[in-house]
Amino acid sequence: MSTTVVPPSPPAKVNRIGLELSDYKGAKSTLCAGCGHNAISERIIEACYEVGIEPHRVAKLSGIGCSSKSPAYFLSRSHGFNSVHGRMPSVATGTMLANRNLIAIGVSGDGDTASIGIGQFVHLMRRNLPMVYIIEDNGVYGLTKGQFSATADIGSKLKNGVVNDLPPIDTCALAILLGATYVGRSFSGDKKQLLALLEGALGHRGTVVLDVISPCVTFNDHVGSTKSYSYVRDHDAPLEEVSYIPFFEDITADYDPGTTTEVTLHDGSHLLLKKLSSDYDPTNKTEALRVLTEAHDKGEIVTGLFYVDTKQPNFIDILNIVDEPLATLPESRVRPPKAVLDEVMESLK
Amino acid sequence: METTDIAIKEKEATSKLEKVVNDLSIQVATVNGSGSQSANNVLLRAIFRMGIPVSGKNLFPSNIAGLPTWYTIRACKYGYVARRKEIDFLVAMNPETAEEDVMSLGPGASVVYDERLNLHRLRDDVIFYPVPFDTLVAPVCPNAKLRKLVRNMIYDGVLAKLLGIPMEEIHEALKQQFRKKPSAVDLNFNAAQAGYEYTEKNLPKRGRFYLERMDATRGKIIIDGNSAAALGAMFAGVTVCTWYPITPSSSLAESLMSYMKRYRMDPETGKATFAIVQAEDELAAIGMVMGAGWAGARAMTATSGPGISLMAEISGLGYYVEIPAVIFDVQRTGPSTGLPTRTQQGDILKNAFLSHGDTRHILLIPGSVEECFTMGIEAFDIAEEFQTPVFVMSDLDLGMNNWMSDPFPYPEKPMNRGKVLSAEDLERLGGFARYRDVDGDGIGYRTLPGTKHPKAAYFARGSGHNERAIYSERPEDYVNNMDRLARKFETARKRVPAPVLQESEGAEIGIIAYGSTHWAIVESLDQLRQEYDLPVSYCRIRAFPFPEQVFDFIRRHQRIYVVEQNRDGQMYELLRIEADAEDIPKLRSIRHYKGIPIDARSVTDEIVSQEGKK
């Protein structure tokens, strides 16, 4: 008699709220194989898992374009809204007004943000709405087959030889200038940095802008493109090494205190920034803008966390909204009693 | 003195006609920005306080100061409140338009004017009352800076004396006007009093128009449609309002803001049970409404034609993704900037189909300030029941002018939040399909972001989707979805406010009208019966999709006159799209598109002419 001994499968790894990594996954991506956007979706999944975000509290928002399809590819247990080209900021704003307890994660592209959506983008920054706004930036319109966007670098070349002769809009510089309170840039291929930036972003209660260079393998990954994998790898100048420590873990001292800056986020978590550049201070707005301007002049792509400000009130605070979601306030709290109508009517007689 | 000279010049006939009591119209012509609004409101309210039915219409330019503006007040014992074509009393304060204003009067009318304008030379068949405004204002208003504003109150006093308005009613009206500024009451009353006394001493009454106390306004209120709609929204339990300033809708959002700050702050915490946001443009305003509606809030915006155009794309998204939203459209004269301070019913066709592809929206069409309130409430219920944008089609005349009304009724029914599944529902059902027609009415069940259940989430998208809200380009999924949306629209046909029908015995012909046009129709029906012995039935449309009663009304009559305030007969065209083929030839169109509110006489004349009675 033979017996087969089946070893017990090891218990699945779970995060602090008891969910597995697979609980954060989305539908199968329909984007091109090798698209940088897919790597970003993976980092979003990891970041939410690591931090222990409750999926039902997340609202995924997007506009139109390749990037804007991607919210379907992560966090399938979260509500999502793939809205209208360039209008995700307003839809996100309305969502947060209706339910301030949600965690809004918006995914947009460079066209969706810097061209058709630039009007709503700048006003979102002004309001410091609590949300994470990710720009999947490839400098090109993928879904309409490869036209330049407004973040394409001057002098960069399309596959068909067309050269871009206009300067790019730096969405990070714009965001810092206009009031966003957590602004960074990364590269879809830099797993460690992007993950740390995302984890920190999830603990921030204000507008987060992460411009993630995400090469388009189909239309913008050739020689002459300044947003190809090889170009970005060669020209990436990290500003600092970013490390994230969730609020439920103690800070371990694996950084040399002399060269690190520690940023405490709203939920008590920490970002540790190991400085590569000796005097960089991410709480100094002027310095952040100087670094970005200088990088443009040198043709470098600086990555890292440029600017963070945890003191500014966000839009929900400014509006003085009750603590509960407006969406589900009971009738007794939103329909004044008959006495109020009587009072108003009397004043009009 | 000069006044007596004029009296001699007048034709005898004008002063010997029969006395007319409580049936007259007054037009005040001033320069925009001269502060005449308070004087006009006080006059209106004083007449209202005498118990006489009254209405006021402001015909103003798109300008802050300098251009001509007219305010008309109609006092009418029969209760007619539509604009009247004929002016009986002109107050000519604007040198630029005074001559034209005087020349457009009918014989026998009266003119109160600033003495310096020398208008009495223009005609000898109207009655002139010159008033030295500047001489009178100086002693009652030592502060020279305020004189420009206060001098208007003088004509209130002059008219009070000439028409028979008791000064105590002017005083009471002033107290209501300047509730928070007692010093302004005294200052203005003294000016009115100066006008009254001057008239008593120097301007003997001629002409045939008088006002006398009656008892037809007891218990009634005076309010503009925008304030009424704002009150409706507040009692509907609105929680999110995002808007962008545009005439003539701005005062709707601003009025909402002031009511909400007063009545919707949480008593425990002092925090707001609402969010009102002035957006960067109409695209953002409607985008925020969509986000809020998707996340479960009762959300609204208020705008006018150009704003509606910008909202077209996202309105289509709302229809296809199925998101509740309320859009107040206070219509003005287009196209383009058009006449931005003048009224029109110009967005009917556009809003019915607003978007690209196959789209039909629910329109509610208030015909009174009371309906601005009641439909302001009902729109939110319907939007959530049907999970779709609902347009409330007001207009400048209704929205910005003062109307008399019965006090508004407190909502009897509790709020209807529509088909929303909770975490408990999902636990019981084991999941759901967002766009499945479970009940056969075309309306699916939705969940709100934040619902704590692993099966609660769905992905809202403007792209093609199947019943489970999954991306799909399959022909059968697309058709299934579009057919369900059409079914939902048919369900709405039975739910939206029914038309108000007024059958006239033996009537072969009927009138179809809607919105602010209603008040001219009411008067025209009487004119047709009294002057032409023509019985006419009336159907006032209050919503799109048209309920079945509208088509029954058309079937019952030989000829239908669709009366409206636009050039292209937009409701007429919409009815032609929807009516039975054999009924289409019955439809005829009467259009009024001058930018000023429609009057009864224009309607009567046109019907009489088309009926061959003239």
Image (spheres, helix red, strand yellow):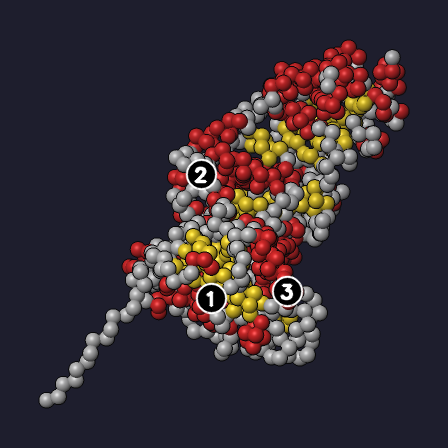
Q: Position of residue B205 (x, y in %)?
A: 77, 16
Residue type, numbered disc 1: Gln
Disc number for residue A193: 1
Nearer the observer: mark 2 or 1; the answer is 1
Most extreme residue toward the bottom is A1
Total count of labels: 3
Q: Is residue A200 above or below residue B297?
A: below
Q: Position of residue B320 (x, y in %)?
A: 51, 61
Q: Marks 1 and 3, how far apart in space?
A: 21 Å
Disc number for residue B271: 2
* Chain under callout 2: B
Is A241 left, or right, of B62 in this rendering?
A: left
Picture residue at 39% right of the left edge, 55% below the top: A269
Residue type, numbered disc 3: His
| Residue B51 shows in the view | no
Q: Nearer the viewer, residue A15 or B90?
A: A15
Is B575 left, or right, of B410 in this rendering?
A: right
Q: Nearer the viewer, residue B319 or B161?
A: B319
Q: Marks 3 and 2, how far apart in space?
A: 45 Å
Q: Are marks 3 and 2 on the same chain?
A: no
* Chain under callout 1: A
Picture residue at 61% right of the left edge, 73% below the top: A226
